Amino acid sequence: MPLDVKSAREIVLAECLKVDPERRGSESVDLLDCLGRTIAEPILLDRDQPPFDRSMRDGYAIRAEDVRNVPASLRYVGEVKAGEWPSMDLREGEAVQIMTGAPAPVGADAVVMVEHTEQINPGSLRVLRSVRQGENIANRGSEQSEGATVFSSGTKLSAFGMAVLASVGKRRVKVFRRPTVAILATGDELVDIEENPSPSQIRNSNSYSLYAQVLRSGAIPKILKIARDNLFDLRRQIALGIQEDVLLISGGVSMGKYDLVEPVLSELGVQVHFDSVNMRPGKPTVFATHGSQFVFGLPGNPVSTFVAFELFVLPVLQRLQGLKPGGLSLVRGTLEQEVFEKSGRTAFLPARVFGRPGRNVISAIAWKGSADIFSIVAANGLLVVPLETSSLRAGDEVEALLFDEFQSEGPF
């Protein structure tokens, strides 16, 4: 009896939560190689941010009290640029020209923007607008205090995260080890991509879409030689694959005479947790474990393989990298056209998800089944048709599982 999608995902999540990322190990890498990696140590701030009272504008450092009544005339006594420490203290009735990012001199409690001033002569300045105490100055430690935790272990690094690490002087960063993923395509009908297929053969495309999905997840993909539909070849290739952290097998998991993957898994001591999910495409999806290794038997049709990866493999790869596994990237939007679905299963149909002013739009893509990779090229998401829903109408609010960049139509 096939499991529903929710139950199948719960089994996968329960198994991958048994993994302790700390025990899997970490490595120290250069900051420039950290994008998308997961930090394996807490990062502490090595000094206050900002480290001094910092000007937020180009203008003049002054005492707010001196410009309570405007216009006000002040004595011009010098300047401070970014990277320079003030050589003077500010006294009553004085102004110091200051640049954005420069430290405010002792005695200054505000900065008036340059456009609100007039130069009277080289030694004096007229201020045309009053300012409040603290205006246009970021006080020392107002963003973060020295010793504060800026990142906890388990944080995935973004571009801004790399900027933060640079600001605290982290040239090398301790990150969780990336899992290795063996990719094994099976079937006598498959040939390598550089070969000319016979009339009954096709080129191996699944290994390359899976390679891209694994790479995008942050893991390390390793494509194995195609396994033929015989027990000897499958045993040899699967035994090789389960030496990696994760093994992805595409094909050979249905009910046909030459679908031999499950018998080989059983022979090698691999524990199968489920072998069928009530979804379209991707019903004959297998999830198994072998000690600390994870094994997935994915359907042979390319779209089925892609969908099963997004639903079941991705959470495992997240956990193995020290991330919290989990939530699907679901987007709500308005369905652009009517959709009929008679499978009686939860369906994940190729779709284009994009934004229009004030709303998201989800447009189903016409496709000819789970072997049709040419239609799905235009998709960036999968329209979710709930279990036993036979039709959706144009204008309905629906959900899509986003797997690629969100697109926008309009001026912004």
Image (cartoon, rainbow, N blue to C red):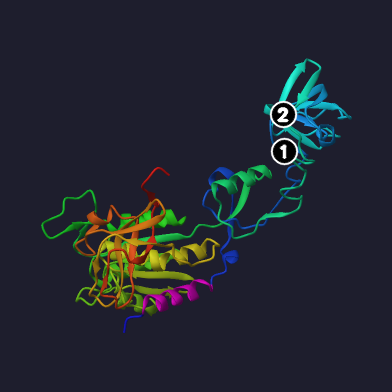
Residue 291, which numbered label? none
Secondary structure at badge 2 equals strand
Q: Amino acid at mark 1?
A: Asn
Name the residue: 77% across, 43% down.
Answer: 139
In the rendered image, residue 17 lying in the magenta stretch gets the answer yes
Q: Closest to the observer: 103 or 158? A: 103
Marks 2 & 1, CB-CB < 8 Å contact: yes
**Residue 157 sits above or below residue 113 on the image:** below
Figure quadrant of the N terminus: bottom left
**Mark pair 2, 1: CA separation:** 9 Å
Q: Is residue 223 visible?
A: no
Give the crowd class for mark 2: few <14, some 14-19, many >=20 residues within 10 Å: many
Position in image of residue 256 (x %, y %): 20, 76
For label 1, the residue is 136
Q: Which residue is mark 2?
A: 59
Q: Amino acid at mark 2?
A: Gly
Region of the chain picked out in magenta, as a range: 4-18
The residue located at (26%, 78%) in the rendering is 344
Q: Is residue 137 left or right of residue 295?
A: right
Depth check: give the residue in front, 42 or 383.
Answer: 383
Q: Determine if residue 92 is in view.
A: yes
x, y percentage for residue 218?
Answer: 47, 55
Image quarter of residue 90 = top right
Q: Which residue of the protein is positioned furthest toward the left in this rendering? A: 199
As drawn, the residue found furthest toward the top would be 121
Comparing 139 with 299, the one in front is 139
252 horizontally vs 324: left or right? left
Q: In the image, is 147 to the left or to the right of 171?
A: right
